[in-house]
Amino acid sequence: MNFYDFFIFIVRFAFANVVLLHTFAQVKNETSRKPSKALQHICFNLESIRSTAVKMKPINTGDRQGVLLDLRKNLEDHSFIELCVAVGKTYELIQDTDEMTPTLLQCTDLMCTSFVRSQVQSSEHLVAFIDDALTKLGGAFSR
């Protein structure tokens, strides 16, 4: 695995966690629940990804413009939705519930992209993306 492969993996995993964070925000608004263990894991994963991205050194891409990943385009990709569902099911096991998957499947309407910036091209963009998501979506759980 080279740097670009790792970067694509880490960004897609961050995207999946942000989609799940958005899903939790919707479920919480519908049920008025307190933050769960699964939510704590999502936030921990995003903070860990952010910590890794902060430590990444910018690289010279030469003629290439780097790697551009777009959350909106990923939401149109069936394999990305499968990743979100699989990660969501893992969180459901932690929480011992299965209420998130139906809501998650509705997230493909791109509504969650209105809350956060949707494009990531560098580790700096990834840090800003995660900060934005935790500020805008994580704030729903601060009560």
Image (cartoon, grey):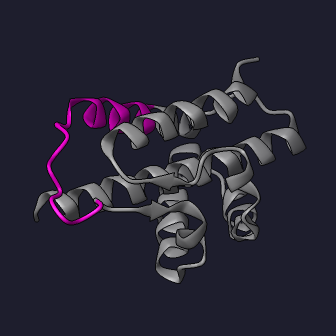
Q: Is residue 124 left or right of residue 34?
A: left
Nearer-the-camera pick, 7 or 20? 7
Nearer-the-camera pick, 60 or 116? 60
Residue 112, x across and y down, in percent: 71, 54
Residue 109, x across and y down, in percent: 76, 69
Nearer-the-camera pick, 25 or 68? 68
Q: Residue at x 38, y 53 (%)?
A: 121
- In this view, 97 is above or below 140: below
Residue 104, x across and y down, in percent: 68, 63
Q: Residue at x 29, y 61 (%)?
A: 65
- In this view, 73 is above or below 10: below
- In this view, 15 is above or below 21: below
Q: Is residue 74 left or right of residue 30?
A: left
Residue at the far left: name it.
Answer: 2
Residue at the far front: name it.
Answer: 63
Question: Which quadrant would the C terminus be assigned to in this image?
Answer: top right
Q: What's the magenta region?
A: 44-65
Which quadrant would residue 2 be assigned to in this image? bottom left
**Total labels drawn:** 0
Nearer-the-camera pick, 122 or 89? 122
- In this view, 115 is above or below 85: above
Q: Residue at x 16, y 37 (%)?
A: 57
Which quadrant would residue 28 be assigned to in this image? top right
Question: Which quadrant would the N terminus be assigned to in this image?
Answer: bottom left
Residue at the far top: name it.
Answer: 143
Is 56 magenta? The answer is yes
Q: Residue at x 86, y 39 (%)?
A: 29
Is 61 magenta? The answer is yes
